Structure formats: C-alpha cells, structure tokens
Image (cartoon, grey):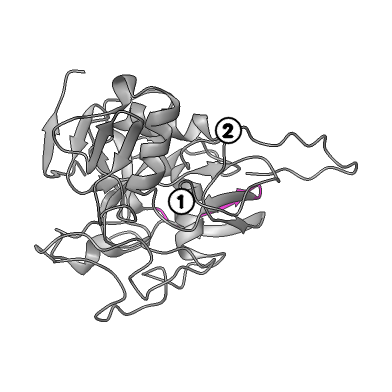
C-alpha cells in the first residue's frame, strides 16, 4: 500500500554473540537511549484476509540481537548531527524545527524533545551512520514493537486507549515519550506521533518469498517502507505493529521521522544534546 503523507517533495542500529569476547571500539558519537532486543524468533505480519494483503502471510522470523532507540530521534539530537557535519544536504531550511546560529545548529526553543521531521531517507541513513548505526529493517522494527510473540496488535496490547499513542490529533506532535503506550521492550511512540523510516525497500508481496533469518528486504525498489503511524492518521488500524506503508524515499514529510539501531554491543545510554 502506498501511503500519502503530508509532504514536501524535493528532487532529489543487531549484536551477534561469539564464544570469545569481541574487540570493543567505542563509538565516536553518542547514541540516544537504547534497549536490547534479544535474539530469537517472533511472528511477523498478520493472517490473510484480516488486514492488508501486504501483511500476509503471518510467518516466523529469526533475528540476531540488536539495540534500538527507545525514542524517536529528536530535533536536539539531529541539530547536534548537523553541527558536527556542517549541515550540508542534511538540513531542510524551511520546515525543520531547527535553526542555524553562529555556533552551529540548534532546535527551536521548546521543540528540543519533539521528533525531527522533514528528513528524507538519505538524511535519516546519514544520521544513523554518524552514530555507527543504521535504520532498522522492517523485521527489526516490528519485533521491537511487537515482542517475541504475535499476540499484540498494538505495541502494548490488543486495545488502544486515550493517551497510549498520539494519533488522530490535528493539534500536532507530542514530545517523545509522552504517550503512555510502550512496546514489549519498552520503546515509546512505536504507534503514532510520526511514522518511521526503515531500511527496507517496499514490496507488497515480499513476505511470500522473504528469507526468514535476518531478512534485509528487497534488493531494490521505488518506495521505502515506513512503520508506526502518525499523529494525523485517524484510523487505529494504522497504529498496528504489522501495518506497512510505502513512501517515496526522496520526500520530506510533516509526519515522518525515524529511530536507529546499532550492531555493536556497546552503546552510550545518553541522548545527544544532554
């Protein structure tokens, strides 16, 4: 399914285990708060004929362990990245809640802890690489949201109540972590607030032929997969863990952000800018 987000178009982090301890290299830059998603199986997707066809078949996926951001990347974190990289093509002047000063880039006052928006897929990928990480695959994102089983339609359970997610809210974004609904692993805002980029190209039929061990998505495509739903969506179906949407990777959107995963077993438990 191709998602129509509110956008402005421009032309355009898993840890493996070993018998011997790995050589540790501290990351050059700090990573925001992260949580370990342990290795093992989970059930991905949904039963045929119940929800969207691109979510079926329900299938078992095995993933290596990885760390994922508890929160969506914030304006303050992204501003630090811009300052360290001199902005370049990673800043979109007219829409981001970030400004440039003589000393670098800063989040607009009062918006420091809101999720960054208007970063296209390349921008999000560059930010993750700056932290020695990457964007999550669809499988990694869904396991972090759902947990090791498939019982949870939403990150916190089978029902959605007021305050658990920021959705159907034309008044706008919430600060990250405001929603009371947490995922199995303790991640915030995996439903609502902003949609989130993943690393995968989108293919509506991918689940029919996917590799079930550490799947990386299709080799190529026209659209990238996004997950999680946003504050402008008025259907609770778009808040579900298995919901998939296709988005132009070059687009910059008012309701689309991201979070990162890292492969290293070492991570810094402090968010950028703090």
- Which mark is drawn over residue 239? none
Q: Foreground residue, 72 or 230?
A: 72
Q: Name the residue carrying label 2.
A: 132
Q: Name the residue carrying label 1.
A: 141
Q: Position of residue 229 (x, y in %)?
A: 26, 56
Q: Position of residue 190 (x, y in %)?
A: 38, 60
Quadrant position of residue 26: top right
Of the two numbered discs 2 and 1 in the rendering, the one whose residue sits closer to the viewer: 2
Answer few, some or many: residues within 10 Å of disc 2's Cα (few below 14, many 20 plus, some between 14 and 19): many
Distance from Cα at disc 2 to Cα at disc 1:
18 Å
What kind of element bears circle 2? loop
Residue stretch in magenta: 57-65
Quadrant position of residue 219: top left
Q: Earlier in the sequence, mark 2 or mark 1?
A: 2
Quadrant position of residue 125: top left
Q: Position of residue 225 (x, y in %)?
A: 33, 40
Q: Position of residue 230 (x, y in %)?
A: 23, 56
Q: Residue at x 46, y 73 (%)?
A: 151
Residue 50 in view, yes or no: no
Considering only vertical position in the picture, is 235 above or below 180? Answer: above
Q: Residue at x 21, y 68 (%)?
A: 236
What kind of element bears circle 1? helix
Q: Foreground residue, 13 or 201?
A: 13
Q: Residue at x 70, y 45 (%)?
A: 266
Q: Foreground residue, 274 or 97?
A: 274
Q: The N terminus appears in which quarter of the rendering?
A: top left
Q: Horizontally, is 226 left or right of 132 in the view? A: left
Answer few, some or many: residues within 10 Å of disc 1's Cα (few below 14, many 20 plus, some between 14 and 19): many
């Amino acid at each position: 399914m191709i998602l129509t987000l509110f956008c402005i178009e421009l032309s355009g982090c898993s840890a493996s285990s070993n018998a011997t301890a790995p050589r540790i290299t501290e990351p050059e830059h700090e990573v925001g708060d992260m949580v370990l998603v342990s290795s093992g199986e989970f059930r991905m997707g949904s039963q045929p004929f119940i929800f969207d066809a691109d979510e079926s078949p329900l299938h078992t996926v095995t993933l290596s362990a990885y760390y994922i951001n508890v929160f969506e990347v914030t304006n303050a974190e992204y501003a630090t990245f811009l300052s360290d990289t001199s902005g370049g093509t990673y800043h979109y002047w007219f829409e981001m809640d970030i400004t440039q000063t003589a000393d670098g880039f800063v989040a607009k006052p009062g918006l420091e802890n809101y999720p960054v928006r208007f970063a296209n897929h390349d921008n999000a990928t560059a930010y993750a690489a700056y932290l020695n990480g990457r964007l999550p695959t669809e499988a990694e994102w869904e396991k972090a949201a759902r947990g090791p089983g498939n019982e949870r339609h939403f990150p916190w359970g089978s029902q959605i109540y007021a305050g658990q997610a920021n959705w159907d809210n034309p008044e706008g974004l919430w600060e990250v972590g405001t929603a009371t609904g947490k995922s199995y692993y303790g991640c915030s805002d995996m439903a609502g607030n902003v949609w989130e980029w993943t690393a995968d190209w989108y293919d509506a039929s991918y689940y029919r032929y996917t590799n079930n061990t550490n799947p990386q998505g299709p080799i190529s495509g026209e659209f990238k997969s996004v997950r999680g739903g946003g504050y402008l969506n008025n259907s609770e179906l778009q808040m579900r863990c298995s919901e998939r949407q296709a988005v132009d990777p070059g687009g910059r959107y008012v309701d689309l952000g991201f979070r990162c995963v890292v492969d290293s077993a070492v991570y810094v438990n402090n968010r950028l800018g703090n």
